[in-house]
Image (cartoon, grey):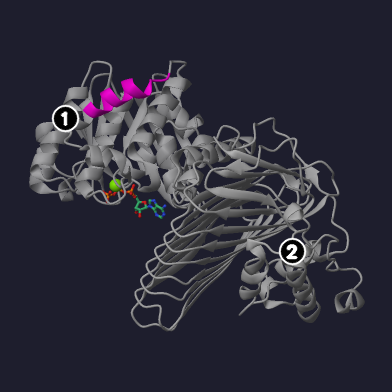
Amino acid sequence: MLEIKNLHAELEDDGKKILKGVDLKLEPGKVHAIMGPNGSGKSTLSYVLSGRDGYEVTEGSATLDGEDILELEAEERAAAGLFLAFQYPVEIPGVGNMTFLRTAVNAQRKARGEEELSAADFLKVVRAKAKTLKIDGDMLKRPVNVGFSGGEKKRNEILQMAMLEPKMCILDETDSGLDVDAMKLVSEGVNALRDEGRSFLVITHYQRLLDHIKPDVVHIMAEGRIIKTGGPELALEVENNGYADLLAEMA
Amino acid sequence: MAVAETKNTQLVADIPVTTGWTLAAREDAKARLAAAGLPGRRDEYWKYTRPDAMTAAEAPAGEFVDYGEAPVFSEVDRLKIVFVDGVYDAAQSDDLSLEGVTIERLEDAASADIHWAQDLYGTLETAGQTPVARPLATLNTASAKDGILLNVAGKVSKPISLVYHYASDTSDAMLHHVVKLAEGAEITVLENGPAAARFNTVMEVDVADRASFHHVRTQGRQHVRNSATHIFARTGEESQFRSFTMTVNGTLTRNEVVLDIQGDNALAHVAGVAAGDGNAPQGYHHDDTVFVTHDAVNCESRQVFKKVLRNGATGVFQGKILVKPDAQKTDGYQISQGLLLDDDSNFLAKPELEIYADDVACSHGSTVGAIDDEALFYLRSRGVPAADAQDLLVLAFLAEAIDEVADEAIRELLLTRLEAWLARRRA
Ligand SMILES: Nc1ncnc2c1ncn2[C@@H]1O[C@H](COP(=O)(O)OP(=O)(O)OP(=O)(O)O)[C@@H](O)[C@H]1O
Ligand SMILES: [Mg+2]
């Protein structure tokens, strides 16, 4: 599915090196988690993969089902099936949430040569999916994320993911800002999408989320690299002992 | 004549032959203009906009562009009144009869000795000359040969649609309209069309108690056009005044609105959207100059102006809210915003509040900015192509102003035009 090899990236502005040789391989249908100290480069990895401006890849590669995604525009990566649930979802005043969702779904369908969804069909699907995430009609009508609470924004990310049905989902701290019930809702939303053809890369600081979304593999990222890879027990180890031992091993 | 003597490179007020009841107003305007002179570059009120093209003896040549689109209000059920290069065209116009309103051409009506419009013609324009002079409007009062006179007695069932066609590249047109709404009357006036190479219009609107005046105007379809428009309105108790303008072309456009809120519990909204591309043959310069005076209790006024500018286009906003000492409970709002799609474009704003009453809620704001990169990336990361994403953000930026158009069908027509304008400008 997703294969990242020796990925190096720096900030375009000042040349600050952030990713220093990331290696990662996700098989279809698998859930991988990435944990790591603040500032280790987790969000940067997700941005570089999804095509945000401002980073320069200086070395290495990233492919999605064999296709070099680093050469693609952000929207092409999305159409190829990559999705990032943002750590900090963006507010867009003046653009209704529903318009936003429909524009996105239809843009991707168009890019893949599929028919656009009719307004009625679209509405039916959105309503059903929104309901399971406890997103009410008012939130669908309001401008994208404007005035949404932290948890509402995260639920809105998952709604977008559910509508777009990407094959490679990257979730960047989707659990932050969620109360216990919302965490369950969101996890159920994610688990409902788990499928043999779909993989997840779940960035989190807490074991809590991984209780709900059970990972197959856990990676520890530090200083722009994956320093350790293991099973679910690695997350428990971090939960109990923090990163000190792992970082010491690295040094 | 003082005007002619001082600068013979400038326009001279020229009173038409058939004047009848308008003669006194025209002579008065001519004298006022002679005393005040035409605007020049050093005038404070013309600090951001050069009046030269509007005051030159000869109109600079125009250039009309045909995109093959049907005119914007074609599908609206309306009474159409057509002017070609500023001259009324009976053949293309509808019959000038509609329940609730009497409709006359200024040129036809002017031969009479007395007329209902006599108390208004030039009167609201004159009142609007203080505290700031607006000489182009005075010139218009003196010289305009034609225009439309609407005497609105009741609720008029469909809009009066003034359409300004264009035939000659050197047309120099001046129109003077007068609209009088009786108590409780209601009318919508639409204006559109490429107009003329140089276009100077004045509309004087008298809105009586509980009357309601709606005005929607588009200015487009001609890249090279120099125009100055003035709306002078006074409004009565519990009345409504709404005026919206969308401008997508024009070398120079100066739209002035002077509103005098005289009756209590009234509402007055003025809004505009300007979309400008400096790559047009002679560029794009758009100026909204608005002056709202609150002279009554418990009235609401809104000014909402948004401009999206690219390739060296310039947008100007000069807006003022003046609250007189007795105008308590005034709710005045003013926002002007520029969205610059590149580093070459300019948005210049001069928002002003002058308040002499103590129990009022007035706010004003002015911002200038670029497309939000974060929002653009967010949209693209969801699969929306960059160009579509940008258009979506531009329309979102303009939305607050467009929402000022109360009629949904007309709002949709305007949006369609804007979308087409944006689409034509994609790289
Ligand atoms: N645009 C930027 N300008 C300056 N520094 C940046 C920028 N983007 C990232 N960085 C820096 O790069 C490093 C990695 O940031 P990143 O956001 O990827 O960390 P993270 O692992 O996601 O952290 P957290 O767990 O706190 O979310 C940090 O030191 C951050 O300050
Ligand atoms: Mg992060």
Q: Quadrant of residue B263?
A: bottom left
- Can you see residue A233? no
Are discs 1 and 2 both within one chain? no
Q: Nearer the viewer, residue B418 or B341?
A: B418
Residue B183 position, x and y percent, is: 46, 60
Type of amino acid at the residue the image marks with label 1? Thr
Image check: A177 left or right of B408? left
Q: Quadrant of residue B80?
A: top right
Q: CA distance from mark 1 to mark 2?
A: 75 Å
Q: For the N terminus of chain B, give its image quadrant.
A: bottom right
Q: Main secondary structure of the magenta part?
A: helix
Residue at image mark 2? B113
The image shows a total of numbered marks equal to 2
Residue at the spot 41% in from the left edge and 60% down from the top edge: B210
Q: Is residue A59 above or below residue B362?
A: above
Q: Nearer the viewer, residue B87 or A181?
A: B87
Q: Which residues are magenta?
A: A116-127
Whether B373 is among the magenta residues is no
Q: Secondary structure at mark 2?
A: loop
Rate crowding at label 2 as few (under 14), some (14 to 19) or many (20 or more) other CA atoms within 10 Å.
few
Please identify the residue farthest to the front as the structure is shown: B113
Tags 1 and 2 touching, CB below 8 Å: no
Determine which of the numbered discs, if any, sits on residue A132 in the image. Answer: 1
- Can you see residue A90? yes
Residue at the spot 39% in from the left edge and 33% down from the top edge: B382
Q: For the C terminus of chain B, give its image quadrant.
A: top right
Q: Is residue B295 above or below residue A146?
A: below
Residue A26 position, x and y percent, is: 29, 24
Type of amino acid at the residue the image marks with label 2? Asp
Q: Nearer the viewer, residue A117 or B247?
A: B247
Residue at the spot 81% in from the left edge and 41% down from the top edge: B167
Q: Secondary structure at mark 1?
A: helix
